[in-house]
Structures are given as structure tokens and as C-alpha cells.
Image (cartoon, grey):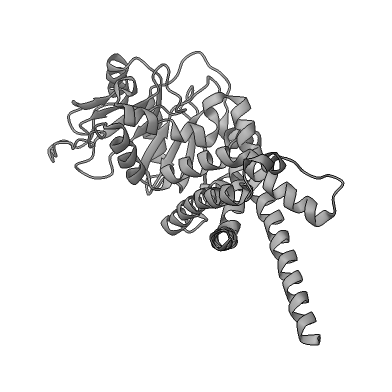
Amino acid sequence: MKLRRIIFNLHLYIGLAAGLFLIVSGLTGSMVVFRDEIEALTHPELMETAVGEEHVPVQAVLDAVRHAYPEDKLLYLRMPRTPQETYLFKMNSAHDLFVYADSYSGEVLGAHRQKETFMGWIALVHTELLVGELGKNILGVSALLLICMCGTGLFLWWPPNGIRNISRGFKIGWPAPWKKFIFDAHRAFGIYTIILLIIVAFTGVSLVFNKAVAELINSLTASAPRPSPPNSRVNEAVDSMSSLDALLYQADRILPAPTTWITFPQTPQAPLVVRKRTTGEFHPNGRSFVYFDQYTGDVLLVENASNASLGARIFNTFYPIHTGVIGGLATRMLQVVMGFVPLFLFATGYMMWRNRRKARLHKNNSKVAY
């Protein structure tokens, strides 16, 4: 019973410490699951275009964007995923200026700062609490604490008098007094969702502390780590990189799969990276990469996800599991529902704690009065 009291207090105080962050993360995550669809509805003039006969060269669109925003530095380019979708250029950082361009006409359609749009703001809250790396780490630690809460909650859920009464932990006494109802609801919903909570929490941790988790998975599976990104051979005599269309054509010959993103070099040594999604990949953006020398256009490295080590293939599933895309619409809807679970468990847990506290105060006051 002493151990049970220690575990109870641990479960309680972890919940009080991390509960607010988990609620915020869960509720915002429920909206981020359908971010693309919501943004297409709220900003159709930027996100969608009329389907034309032929795409203009990507290099021409790139030049138009650079001309329109000469003070901003190009970081990423998202390729259209459907015939109607536009190009998305991310400037300066992954969460700063978003520029949209028509893939058929090459026209720059407009731009906005991520934090200035509703879904962009929601996504920043979900990923970094609007405070950058510190917020990201806070959410990662909160996810670790959620895993601890699942463990302590399972210990408390298990009947002290053995497995004979285990069925009670799955039931809710609907006609019972409200305090008993709150207790039953907290216990039952906790056990019904515990596996999914652990999965969501662990995959969230993998997105925050990705290097540590990748090393853990590689260690457990005896897998070799991913190769380090190669460096370009600095050539100051070259003023600009090869034509982007030529590099994309070369990447398509090497890996005949849809290109999802392009990462532009930010330092003299960095490569240009073409990201692809090969057949059978769960990751919506793919985890296959072609690295090019930014000066000569030479291929420096090819990463094909289908040939990756076991550890890398396991790690590559964490993002699609966390966002719910791994199973299509059904798992995305499940993730929306799971986003409300921390709020429900925190609310019922808080009411249980408050009831216990009131009962204890009443008992102490009665002793003093006596």
C-alpha cells in the first residue's frame, strides 16, 4: 500500500505538471491533422490553381520568386502533390515566410508569414508553443511524462486484490453517484486509450529528440545509422548552381518516383537535396533523397528508403503514425479523437483530486472541531 501511495502521488503530480501542455498539444494536434484541407478552404487563392496543359520550368518559377522577394533567403520548395496544387516556397526558415506560385503560369500568387494565419499559428503552438526550440523541448519532455503517466496509471488501474476483479476496470457505473462515475470514467477511458496514448507520445518524442530516438532504434535493431549528408566541393569560380530542372530530371532517372520537396543549400558546403516518395513508403513526404553538389550538379549520395536499414525503416514510420496518415482517413480521424483524450483525462483526474482534497480538509476540520 505504501508503494501504491507513492505511485499515486507520482501519477498525480506528473499530471498536474504536464497536463496543460498535453491538453494544448492534443487539441492543436487534432486540427493539424487536417491542416492541408483547412488551409485549402481558407486560402484557395494561394493553395489551388486551374489545371493547365503544361507546367512551366521549375527554374523559371524559382527565378520569379527570388525576383519578387530579393531580401528573403530560399530554404525549401514543396512540389505540387495534385494537379491543382501550387508551389510552396519556404523562405528564411521552416516557419517564416511562405510564398505560393502557379505551376502552370509561373505567376507568384502571394505570400504570408506562417504565424499570421490561423492554421499556421495552430501548427506553431502544436510544435513549439510559439517559443521556438524551448517550446519544442517542453513538448518533448511532456510527451515523455505522458508515457510515465501511462505506466503509473496502469499500475493504479490493476486491482490490488488480483486479477479476479480486473473486469471492473473496464466498466463505468452509469447510475452511480457522480463522484464514482468520474472515477470509473477516468479509469476506463485511461485503459481503453493507453496503447494509443503511448504510441502518440513516443512518436511525438521521436520528432523532438529524433537523433536520440534514431540511435535507440538502431541500437535495438543492430542497424547502421543513416549516412551523414555529404558536402559540396566549394568552387568560388561558379556563380550559380545548375538548372533546377536539369537536376530534377537527373533525380528522376536515378529514383523514378514523385519529388516532394527540394532543400536548397544554406552554406557554401551544403548540398542541394531532392526528396522523393518511392512506392510503398508510408511517409507522406517520402524518405528517399538525392544529394547534389550545389556547384557542379554532381550526384553526391542517393538514399533509397526501400533499401534502408531496419532501424531506419522503423524510424521512418513514426511521423506518419503520429500524424495519422499511415492508415488513411480512418487513422486521421482516430488521431483527431485522441487529441481530446488528454483534456478528458486531465479534467476527470482534476475533479478526483479536488474531491479527495475537499474530503481530507473536511476530515481535518472535523478533528479540530472535536
The answer to which quarter of the image holds residue 41 is top right
Q: Residue at x 46, y 35 (%)?
A: 319
Picture coordinates of residue 191, whole percent (x, y): 63, 42
Question: 192 or 308, which lies in front?
Answer: 192
- Observer able to see residue 116: no
Question: From what the image shows, is residue 315 above or below residue 123?
Answer: above
Picture coordinates of residue 207, whole percent (x, y): 43, 43
Which image quarter holds the N terminus?
bottom right
Question: 205 or 184, which lies in front?
Answer: 184
Q: Is residue 113 left or right of residue 164?
A: left
Question: 301 or 50, which lies in front?
Answer: 301
- Observer able to see residue 313: yes
Tally the marks: 0
Q: Residue furthest right?
A: 175
Which image quarter holds the C terminus?
bottom right
Question: From what the image shows, is residue 60 above or below residue 199?
Answer: above
Q: Is residue 104 left or right of residue 309?
A: right
Picture coordinates of residue 276, whole percent (x, y): 37, 24
Q: Residue at x 80, y 80 (%)?
A: 366
Q: Residue at x 46, y 55 (%)?
A: 141
Picture coordinates of residue 272, whole percent (x, y): 27, 33
